[in-house]
Amino acid sequence: MSLILFAFVVRVRDGLPLSASTDFEHNRELQERKQQLRTISKTLARFPDRGTVKGQELNIFFISSEGVSYMTVCHCSLPVAKAFCFLEDLRWEFTTCFNSTAVSLADRPYPFLEFDSTIQKLKQQYNRSGGPALEVTLAEVQGDLIIQPPQEINLEEVDLTNGTANGHMEQGPGSGQSVRLEPVTAPGILSLVLNIVCASLNIIRGVHLIEYTFQDDYEGIWNVVAFLLAFVCCVCQCHLYLFHSSLKKPKSFALLSVIVLCNLFLLGPRNPWQLLFHISVACISTLLILSRKLMDRTNDCGV
């Protein structure tokens, strides 16, 4: 069983991939960890020089030094100190082969793809012996980890926003990275249409009610507010389905709660069947928003 499955070298300032190991394993969790690894690489400047992301069977480790970050996906049975030994060895090898000028001038993804052969040799050594190589000793790394323990990264804190149409994330210049949501499904299209219908009904009723509210000394002002607030929430549900957003779950439930409360408040201007229709559409939309996941699809340039 391989202990070190994937290694990745990126430039810290913009997350530009510099090199990576060839991927010979394709289990689902590995693909998820690689996606998370690339997500973290976009925001490395926000994190300290050492970090970890704990997974079910696979963990992510990374270190950053002199504007370059060295990242790896390892099996959970590999001790933390040995994982960081691997990264220190990787850093040593990379700085021996490429200077800081070459790194700073890189303008396309994976300009040092030939470094993959060195990564493979290092991976094989660790996977065979499970121990450090080159100048780094296990005792030194263990001492460093005691003095400066790695930060455990919570992926909820990593900003996955900056979405563009069809669920794409905003890409940095030359990053070559692409993250998108799963394709829109037929039920998703239906929920969008129904949400648009609900939003239209809310805005029409709200606008019409404004005229009568002015004539009746503002007695129905709160009904107007409820209609307009429900309209805004319906539009937000459509946006949340089409575009990726961080904290998607709490946002979805917040919108659903507001729509339900607004419609319950409007019992009277609306009959129970109308309330049931609006609340049902909101519930279906929330379910589809939460079920639409990120695709495990990145521009790997063959690695």
Image (tube, helix red, strand yellow):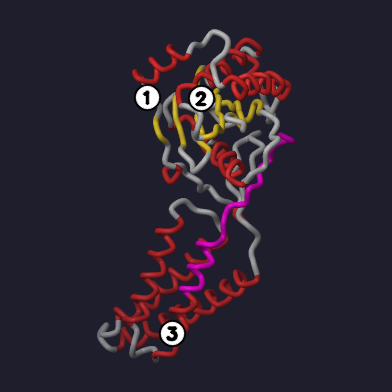
* Residue named by callout 2: 83
Residue depicted at 42% across the width and 43% down the height:
157
* Residue named by callout 1: 149
Residue 288: within the magenta? yes
- Count neighbours of disc 3 (C-alpha within 10 A) and say few if under 14, some if 14 to 19, many if 20 or more: some
Question: Percent from the top left, x then y, of residue 145?
Answer: 39, 20
Q: Secondary structure at mark 3?
A: helix
Question: Percent from the top left, x then y, of residue 144?
Answer: 39, 16
* Marked residue nearer the N-terminal end (3 or 1): 1
Question: Percent from the top left, x then y, of residue 39?
Answer: 54, 40
Viewer-closest of 10 and 151: 151
* Marked residue nearer the N-terminal end (2 or 3): 2
- Count neighbours of disc 1 (C-alpha within 10 A) and say few if under 14, some if 14 to 19, many if 20 or more: few
Mark 2: amino acid: Ala
Relative to 300, is 233 on the left or the right? left
Relative to 50, is 2 on the left or the right? right
* Marked residue nearer the N-terminal end (2 or 1): 2
* Residue named by callout 3: 276
Question: Percent from the top left, x then y, of residue 105?
Answer: 65, 20
Q: Between marks 2 and 1, how big is the CA–CA gap?
A: 13 Å
- Count neighbours of disc 2 (C-alpha within 10 A) and say few if under 14, some if 14 to 19, many if 20 or more: many
Q: Quadrant of the C terminus?
A: top right
Magenta region, residue range:
282-303
Residue depicted at 67% across the width and 38% down the height:
25
